[in-house]
Image: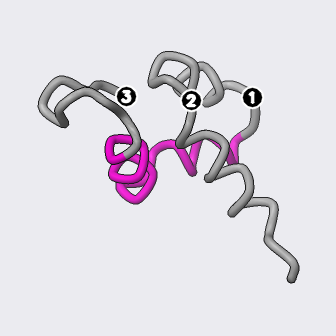
């Protein structure tokens, strides 16, 4: 089964700490766009140990 690059990158970036994920915005335009989506924010927050009202991206 083939996974698109976007799916793989999404999975990796959602596992990074918020500070490190934010640094990835400057790497590629595609990553910046991905990191700016609500879907990414929801997934990243769901993987984090902090309550959602204490998270910043």
Instruction: Say whether disc 3 or disc 1 marks the residue closer to the N-terminus.
Output: 1
Front tag of 3 and 1: 3
Asked whether 43 or 35 is in front, the reply is: 43
The tag on residue 57 is 3
Q: Pick whichever of labels 1 and 2 is earlier in the sequence.
A: 2
Q: Determine the residue located farthest toward the front in the rendered image.
A: 49
Quadrant including the N terminus: bottom right
Residue 33 x %, y %: 57, 48
The image quarter containing residue 44 is top left
Q: Is residue 50 magenta?
A: no
Q: Quadrant of residue 45?
A: top left
Rounded to the nearest whole Å, what is the CA distance between mark 3 and mark 1? 16 Å
Eye-nearest disc, 1 or 2: 2
Could you tell me residue 14's position as x and y percent?
53, 43
Sequence order check: which comes first, mark 3 or mark 2? 2
**Residue drawn where x is 67% and y is 25% of the image:** 26
Magenta stretch? 29-46
Disc 3, disc 1: CB below 8 Å?
A: no
The C terminus, quarter of image: top left
Residue 33 in the image: above or below residue 16: below
Q: Can you say whether 52 is above or below 24 in the image?
A: below
Quote the CA–CA distance across marks 1 and 2. 15 Å
Q: Looking at this rendering, what residue extends furthest in the right direction?
A: 2
Label 2: element kind: loop
Looking at the image, which residue is at 75% across and 37% down? 28
| In the rendered image, the vertical position of residue 36 relative to residue 53, given as above or below | below
Q: Which residue in the protein does label 1 denote?
A: 27
Q: Which residue is mark 2?
A: 16
């Amino acid at each position: 089964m083939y996974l698109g690059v976007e799916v793989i990158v999404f999975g990796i970036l959602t596992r990074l700490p918020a500070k490190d994920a934010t640094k990835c915005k400057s790497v590629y335009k595609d990553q910046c766009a991905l990191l700016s989506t609500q879907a990414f924010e929801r997934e990243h927050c769901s993987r984090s140990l902090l309550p959602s009202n204490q998270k910043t991206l």
